Amino acid sequence: MTVLLFTTDLMTSSKVDAAARRQGVTLVTLGSGAALVERAGQGAELVILDLNSPGVDPTDLVPKLRALPTPPRQIIAFGPHVHEAKLAAAQAAGCDAVMPRGQFHAQVDELIAPA
């Protein structure tokens, strides 16, 4: 299983990378929307968007990801709980799950576990 993570935060990428190794999944971390969509076009079961990273715009990215010939099975977005507008925008854009950062980190193993 391939998981794509859009983040520019080294702590987040490190935590998700450790979880990916525990779960036996391939993690690719990307720092731009263009790179994310391009890589997702090659196949990915899960895309994770860190809403606190510069350049993460779910209203732009989610429709592009959904329009791919083989779209990701699931798109998850997370961000600081105080950024209610960003979380709401991700939900409205069509993310399958949107959650505060703390919840994401608490559930990361479960969220990226192969189906």
Image: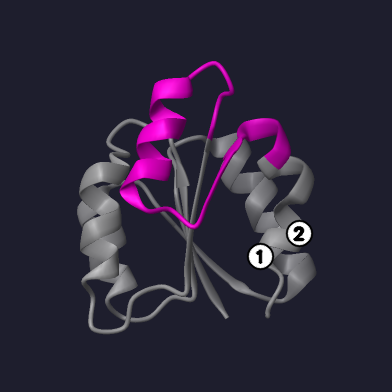
Q: What's under tag 1, amino acid-wise? A: Ile
Separation of residues labelled 1 and 2 (CA atoms): 6 Å
Q: How is the image coloured?
A: one colour
Q: What's under tag 2, amino acid-wise? A: Asp
Q: In what element is the residue under mark 2?
A: helix
Residue under label 1: 112
Q: Quadrant of residue 67?
A: bottom left
Residue under label 2: 109
Instruction: Tell me if 18 is positioned left or right of 38 in this view.
Output: right
Residue pictured at 40% horizontal, 28% vertical: 86
Give the percent coordinates (x, y) of residue 28: 47, 64
Crowding near pointer 2: few (<14 within 10 Å), some, many (20+)?
some
Residue pictured at 35% horizontal, 43% vertical: 92
Residue range highlighted in magenta:
79-103
Was residue 94 drawn as part of the magenta stretch in this picture?
yes
Instruction: Tell me if 86 is positioned left or right of 32 in this view.
Output: right
Q: CB under 8 Å between callouts 1 and 2? A: yes
Q: In what element is the residue under mark 1?
A: helix
Q: Is residue 3 above or below residue 35?
A: below
Was residue 86 drawn as part of the magenta stretch in this picture?
yes
